[in-house]
Amino acid sequence: MKRRAPLLAVLIASGLSAAGSAMTLIAIPWFVLDTTGSGARTGLIAALETLGLLLSVALAGPLVDRYGARLVSMLSDLGTVVAVAAIPLAYATTGLSFPALAALAFGIGLGRSPARTAKSVLLPQAIETAGASVERGTSAQEAVQRLGDLLGAPAGGALIAVFGAAPVLLIDAGAILGGVLLVGVLVPAGSPSAHSGTGVRGYLGDLRDAMIRLRGDRLLFAIGIVVAVTNALFVGLASVLLPAYGSLVWHNSALVGMAIAAVGVGGLLGAGLYGWLGAQLPRRMTFVGCFLLSGPPTFAALALDPHPVLLLVLLVVSSLGRGPLNPILAGVKYERVPVEFRGRVFAVLTTAALAAMPLGTLLAGVLLDVIGLRPAVLVLGGLCLLATSCPLVFPVWRGLDRATEPAKAATPKVSPPATSAHG
């Protein structure tokens, strides 16, 4: 049990963080709307939290490598705890001005990404200590994060209905603090990277080295591009076209929520199945099959617009393929990226995936206006088919198959990080 303690700590902390984020996503706008009555201010607060998240995604990587994943995970989560708890506490005591609320919302977003990146870097060592397979460990993290996302939002909504938004924010802060304590007590401290520079120039050099490493690894570069494209297409579907179906075709907002829940349930089941069977499956062909299953069939199911029950079943079945994708790619990244570069490289890949999302919503909106709803779904589905077919067409994707010593074999030459006289 002692050997498994670090892995359990990382997994539980990841699940608590995901659930807390989902709860906050509802509780903060609800709190702002309740206390200000302004839709514009509510939207601004949500936008500031998102801006903080986006700014911290790429910037967090060098910090993880420089100061160690355990320390960054704990400090980032503690910062989020303070920012989340300060909103209801300040409002109930000294008062909370709108500029202060805006600053706290920005701080909440700023802490989310470093904590998540740090936990992904902590995971492989925890898996090794526990003696578990990479497939089982990465699938477990994917499952707990999906479970947190799936349960956090409805739990937050139900708790708000009973207690109000302010107590829910305190519950969220308490859940994240529990994860901090688990990581602090049960996960051993690692060594910071010896390759990280100091000062601003060294920090920028760390980011440059991550880009050089990605360009030098053709498989990771291809993964970054394809994941960014598919993320953009799915965000366009979920954020623009699915609500349009609810409004223009189904005339039923509840069905939109049920469709999103069906996708979440399918992904959770898929992650569990991969954790059970993944070690015995050929990795590349499993990825290809799941990638194709999770992509075009989802768009096709919406375009066909079957009976709602059949639609939900199709979405669950298609989304089974989503569950194994992140665990497979996590295993590939752990193999190909040396420990001292993982924070930087993982953060750059996440940045690329997030940066493409606004393009997907923009494309979906333009297509909706120009060619109509169903043709727009078919166009995005066709683009998704092209993207998900790449692992079948291009030889570089053969690198998904397990290698014996891939982290050494896939290490391109990287220039030493710059240093600063003021560091």
Image (spheres, grey):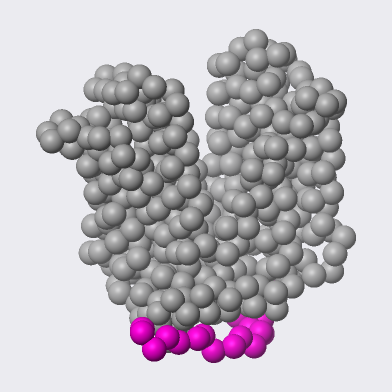
Between 13 and 401, which is closer to the camera in this rendering? Answer: 13
Side (left or right) of 270 relative to 30 = right
Q: Name above or below for residue 13 compared with residue 105.
A: below
Residue 406 within the magenta-colored segment of the rendering = yes
Side (left or right) of 292 relative to 108 = right
Provide residue 127's location: percent of width, then percent of height.
44, 67
Q: Is residue 405 visible?
A: no
Residue numbers of the magenta segment? 400-423
Side (left or right) of 312 relative to 51 = right
Side (left or right) of 76 relative to 416 = left
Q: Residue furthest right?
A: 393
Rendered image quadrant of residue 190? bottom left
Which residue occupies 65% across, 15% down?
247
Which residue occupies 65% across, 17% down?
246
Residue 7 within the magenta-colored segment of the rendering = no
Which residue occupies 46% across, 61% down?
117
Between 335 and 378, which is closer to the camera in this rendering? Answer: 378
Rendered image quadrant of residue 78? bottom left
Provide residue 220's location: percent of width, then percent of height.
68, 68
Q: Residue furthest top?
A: 251
